[in-house]
Image (cartoon, rainbow, N blue to C red):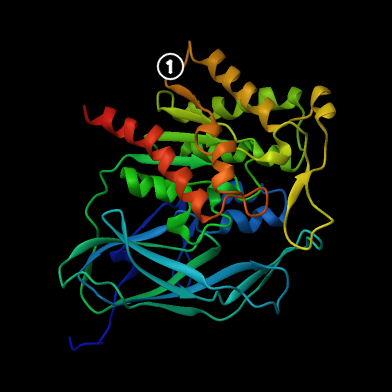
Amino acid sequence: MSAGDLRDIPLDTVEVRGAITIERTERGLLPRRLPAWARAQIPDPFMVQTTAESAGIRLALRTAASVIELDVSATRMAADETVSLPPSHYDVTSGGELVARASSIAGSRYVFSFEQPLGYAAPGPPTTVRISDIDGGGRERELELWFPFTDEVEVLGLRADAPVTPPAPDGRPRWLHHGSSISHGYRADSTTGTWPVVAALRAGADLTSVAFSGNAMLDPFTARTMRDAAADLISVKVGINLVNGDVMRMRAFRPAVHGFLDTIREGHPETPVVVVSPIWCAPVERAAGPTVQDPTRTYEWSIAGGTSAEVAQGKLSLATIRTELRDIVDRRRPEDPNLSYLDGLELYSERDAQRMPLPDNLHPGPDAQHHIGERFAELVLEPFIAARSR
């Protein structure tokens, strides 16, 4: 093959990782993070698209290629059909390290805004993502090509300037994680900059993310999806979205957490499960939700819509959620020794916020995303993997 020539690679040559299910469409492959029966139960248009986005999904392959082209039909959420979209990033890793990156503008849109929450698809043309800076020195190696966490991605075609073969069997422990936009990656700089991927790459874990922006709501269909998914380690990070939307009082929260964990345990009776409480978020540490935008500012800045007095009446704050989650885990542990609790303040605390403030008073920026990922790897993943190897 002459320099610059690319050959078509059959899609069944590569492995899709990080998806719950994979739809075979008329045009190619569409990885999904919820099965069809669960998607039918989605309650609102915002969740339709956040669950469709590709957080943690990637293609795995073995090749000596220095150039890879990926034809995709990519859909990104936008407030209308005409607004300019930012680029979406496709990252390539090998051995846990970032080795290449390319950007592309999604051709299709899912039109949604909280001011006009209709939610509809505006189809556009496919796009080609060309990754041309993969410098492997001409030797074959295992690669993972990570999709943008911001986009729904249907894979239409694949080309490379060297042969591609299936990856070796993945012997890494399978980590299944559920969380909010903080875990999904909002305000991260790319998928490999989202904290779960940072943690997985550092520790050597095979991540499947069922983290959905705005939708870590203890939904029963999410618990059933996790019940049925393969996993060696499970983590459930809940709290901030319940406060954001002011969707529960303490009376409903307690049994909802128990029910979520009970459902997971139906499919994973002995799998280690880590319950993770919220990271630091100043406006709702002691005050109740919902979180709202500060009307005195022209940029995104979240403040509490409730008060601390309302917490005493049964509304939720982050502090009360942390206390309650710890108590729930303590109550369950005598009969479930593989259940544990991680205080989210060990991942990102008030002191951390002084060094790495939340850009919108709610979501971690790229620096804090990396910090949280490093801490989770240190506190959870690496000890778990070390214990498995003994």
Say which element carries label 1: loop
Q: Residue at x 17, y 71 (%)?
A: 137
Instruction: Return the x and y of residue 95 as percentages of the image width and height.
Output: 26, 55
Instruction: Return the x and y of residue 120 as percentages of the image width and height.
Output: 71, 67
Q: Residue at x 48, y 71 (%)?
A: 26
Q: Residues within 10 Å of mark 1 (few under 14, many from 20)?
A: few
Mark 1 highlights which residue? 337
**Is residue 116 shown to the viewer in this render?**
yes
> Amino acid under label 1?
Pro
**Is residue 34 shown to the viewer in this render?**
no
Please, is residue 148 above or below residue 347 in the view?
A: below
Please, is residue 142 above or below residue 383 in the view?
A: below
How many callouts does the rendering have? 1
- Say left or right for 26 vs 112: left
Please, is residue 49 above or below residue 73 in the view?
A: above
Figure quadrant of the N terminus: bottom left
Instruction: Return the x and y of residue 6 as percentages of the image width and height.
Output: 27, 83
- Say left or right for 278 vs 305: left
Figure quadrant of the C terminus: top left
Q: Residue at x 46, y 58 (%)?
A: 191
Instruction: Return the x and y of residue 326 as percentages of the image width and height.
Output: 57, 21
The residue positioned farthest toward the top in the image shown: 334
Please, is residue 89 above or below residue 203 in the view?
A: below
Q: Could you say which is closer to the camera, residue 249 or residue 36?
A: 249
Q: Could you say which is closer to the camera, residue 254 or residue 154?
A: 254
